[in-house]
Amino acid sequence: MPGSVFRAAFMLAAAASHPVTISNCGVSNTVASAPSRVITMNQGATEFLLAMGLEGSMVGTAYLDDAIWPKYATSYAQIPVLSSSYPNETQIMALNPDFIVASYNSAFRANYSSGGRVRGIFSQNTIGPCAGFGSDWGQSWTTCRPQLHAAGISTYLFEDACEDSSLRPATVTEDTVYKEMRALGSIFGTDVEPLVTEMKADFDQAAALVSSGMHGSGLKTVWLDCVGRCCQVEDGQEEQVFVGGGTGAPNMLMQEAGLSNVFSDRSGNWVCVNVSDIVAAAPDVIVVVDAAWDSAVDKIKWMYNDAEFCKLEVLRAARFVSIPFSATTLSPRNGPAALDLATAALHVRTGSQTATQQSGVGSFSPFFLQAQTSCQLCPLSTAYVVYDDASGDTYDPLCTTSSSTTTTLAQSNEASDAHGALPEGYLSAVLAALGIFTPTLLA
């Protein structure tokens, strides 16, 4: 199917009728009736179905990246959790599923060897061998969706993760999210238009927020997904980190939040870039991904211990926004996350008050970050931070040094000079950091 054609083509005019024929990521299948024994293999897929009120049709979930969205916590608690990562084929087949939904193609892979380990899920003991059209993609692995279909188990794979990258959207946009939601609505005979309308309202509000708050100026942003282990380089080569590229959900969220992705010109959902490229770009804000296996705080501490990152004004002013990994994949959380991303970015850049959609996106207390970075190469001094912490919480530094716990008047003046282009209100924040008075700012 040509790349310009929607990869999940449905007979949408008959949204509530079955059978429904699906052409999804190059693999076709017919769903005879609304699925009633569904397994969701990733958190984004899980939250999509919970948003549609389908918890009663779900027999299992898997692979939480972080906490489930609070608005769905009660419904989620009713569904068996098969595994903290991917379940094995025995667990899956024991539930006699009639439908499997996944955010990533790895959820449908056959067993294969990589790095001395056996990876993948399905084997010849259940539905294999997984070979031929719809399974072979010119990779070291194959997927098993045609074989699952033959066994009476329909599948759906989010189109930004199609096995064949040429079948993915050229660039993920908010329309991509709506298409996925409408596609699932067609399969389950569910009206998703109220959900689409809610998401559109959040996206629209987010897009206008930063432009208004920055008086038309943009905020250069780096989306930091992984440091220290995700980008392998040869000895002697420059250090690299894993960031949001120009074609995936991270770029979509930054665009919808009114932020300017520094690496929008790099093709891919995520890409490896040299640290020097980030330093040269001098971003206004760094969005740091938080996941159960790789916390945002650990990545921030890593940056404060890296000599190149220590050169950045964004570190000196602690302009970080934390976003849960679950909000960075296609899901109903994308709209609220974009709005929270915009408000949190403005908060750390200007000291403005923030509101929350409880998407999990937010900022840190500067005093928490000061304590966490007190042992690092360039520990944070709150004198350079324009936002405050209204919680009143106190934090013990991990190390006690004069550089991490003491702010002098000279440092305050230096900070003021360094931030000469900051919006009005910066001086009051510096005075607040010195304990002279406390402005009313929301962390």
Image: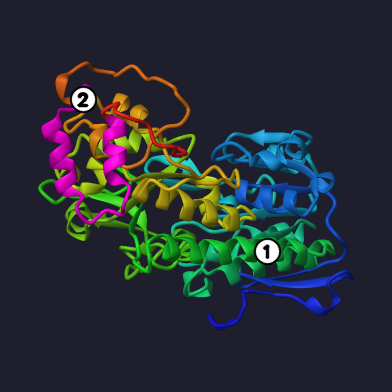
Residue stretch rendered in magenta on the structure: 404-433
Tag 1: amino acid: Pro
At x 31%, y 24%, the residue is 371
In the figure, residue 298 lies in which quadrant? top left
According to the picture, the residue beneath numbered tag 2 turns out to be 404
- Dot 2 or dot 1: first in sequence order is 1
Q: CA distance from mark 2 to mark 1?
A: 58 Å
Element type where label 2 sits in the image: helix
**Residue 167 appearing in the image:** yes
Q: Around disc 1, counting alpha carbons within 10 Å, would you say few (fewer than 14), some (14 to 19), or many (20 or more)?
A: many
Q: Is residue 137 magenta?
A: no
At x 21%, y 30%, the residue is 379
Secondary structure that dominates the magenta span? helix
Element type where label 1 sits in the image: helix
Tag 2: amino acid: Ser
**Quadrant location of the N terminus in the rendered image:** bottom right
Q: Camera-side residue: 213 or 360?
A: 213
Q: In the image, which disc is placed on residue 146?
A: 1
Q: Camera-side residue: 85 or 381?
A: 381
Residue 145 place in picture, x, y as percent = 65, 60
Q: In the image, which disc is placed on residue 403?
A: none
